[in-house]
Image (tube, rainbow, N blue to C red):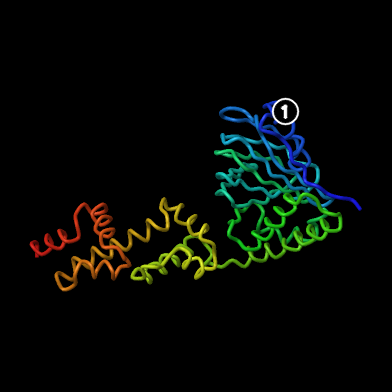
Amino acid sequence: MEIIRPLKFGTLSLPDHESRLVCRSILLDMLGEATIATDEGDLAGLTGLFWRYVSLSLATVYFPKTPLRLAANGVSDAGIVIMRAMDGPLVVHHRRKVVKTPHGDVIFLPADASFEITLPEGGRFDCAHLPAYAVAAVRSALKPVMMQPLAADCLPLQLLTNYAGYLLRQEYQSEEHAGMMVAHFYDLLPVLAEHVGNMGPRDAPQNRMASIKRLIEQNLANGSFSITDVAQAEGITPRAIQKFFSREGATFSRYLLGRRLALAKDLILAEGNSTSISQIAYNVGFNDLSYFNRTFRSRYGVRPSDLRRLAAMAA
C-alpha cells in the first residue's frame, strides 16, 4: 500500500541561497518559474510543508517577516491556483488588475497566467494547485470566484482550507485515504461557487456593517453584550467582525465604548437632574461607575457631573 507523506522542508540554519532553491523547486509545479525578491534581509531560515497527490498539490511556506515580492510565469497546465497570506495582506498583480486581500482571505488565479504577488509583511504563505483536468467539471461554475478576494469567514471556504490543512499536517496517509480527502476537497468547490454566486446585498461589507451597527444600537443598555453576541446574530465569526471594523480604523470594543459614551452625554444634557449620573451610566451598559467617569472624561475632557453643571448654567 502506497503511503503519502507531507514533505517538511527547511531548517533555521538553511542559508539564503539554499532557501531560495528549495522554495523555487517546491513552487515550480504550482506557479511556474518564480523569482523572489526581499526588501530587507534574505530568505535564510525559510521553512514549510509540501504535500502532493496526483490531482492536488499543497504548500505552506514560512517566509521571513520582511516585505517580499514573488513573480511567477505560470505553468503550462490551465488549472487553478489558490493562495492566501496569513501574517499580513496579499497583493496580486495580474495583467492590469491589482487585487489586495486582507490576511487570511483567499484568492483564486488561473495557473497558466503570469502574475506578481507582494507580501508586505512576509510571513506565512499558503498555496494550492488544482490541475485542469481535476477542475474541468466545475470550471464554469468557478468563474464568479476567480480573481475575487474571498473572506476567510466564508463557511464553504473554511471547510476547503480545513481539508487542505489536514492533508498538510497529517504525518502520513494511505493512497485510499488521501484520495477520499481530495475528493471531498473538490466536492466543496461547487458549494463555494454557489455560495459566492448567491450572496445578496446583505453580504456586501457596507450592508453587513450597517446590520452590525444596528445590533449594537439595540443593545447599548446591555452591559454583558459582546462581540460573540454579534457573531451569533450575524452568523459570522468574531474575527470577521473585527475585520469589518479594522477597515474603518476602529475595533469592535472601541466603537461600542464610543457609542455608549455618546449616548450617555446626550442623556446627561437632555435629562438635567432628573436622572442620576450612576443611573445613566447603568442605562447605557456601564457596570462600573469609576470606569464610566474615567472613560467619559478621557473622551470629552470633562467629568459627567461637571458637564451636567455646565449645561445647567448655560440653560
Q: Which residue is under mark 1?
A: 18
What residue appears at the point 60 percent right and 61 percent down from the top-left corner? 154
Residue under the image location 52 percent in, 62 percent down: 204
Q: Residue 266: horizontal and vertical position, in percent?
A: 23, 65
Q: Is residue 291 above or below residue 28?
A: below
The correct choice, above or below, for 12 with respect to 76 in the image is: above
- What amino acid is labelled 1 in the image? Glu
Q: Is residue 284 visible?
A: yes
Q: Residues within 10 Å of mark 1 (few under 14, many from 20)?
A: some
Residue 161 in the image, given as x and y percentages of width and height: 67, 55
Pick whichever, 269 or 289, lies toward us: 289
User: From the image, which quarter does the C terminus lie in?
Assistant: bottom left
Under tag 1, what secondary structure? helix
Vertical placement of residue 208 versus 39, above or below: below
165 or 55, which is in the foreground?
Answer: 165
Q: Residue at x 24, y 70 (%)?
A: 279
On the image, the x and y values in percent for residue 253 come to 40, 58
Q: Is there any visible trace of residue 132 in the rendered image?
A: no
- With 225 as the anchor, is 115 left or right in this view? right
Q: Which of the pair 31/222 is nearer the observer?
A: 222
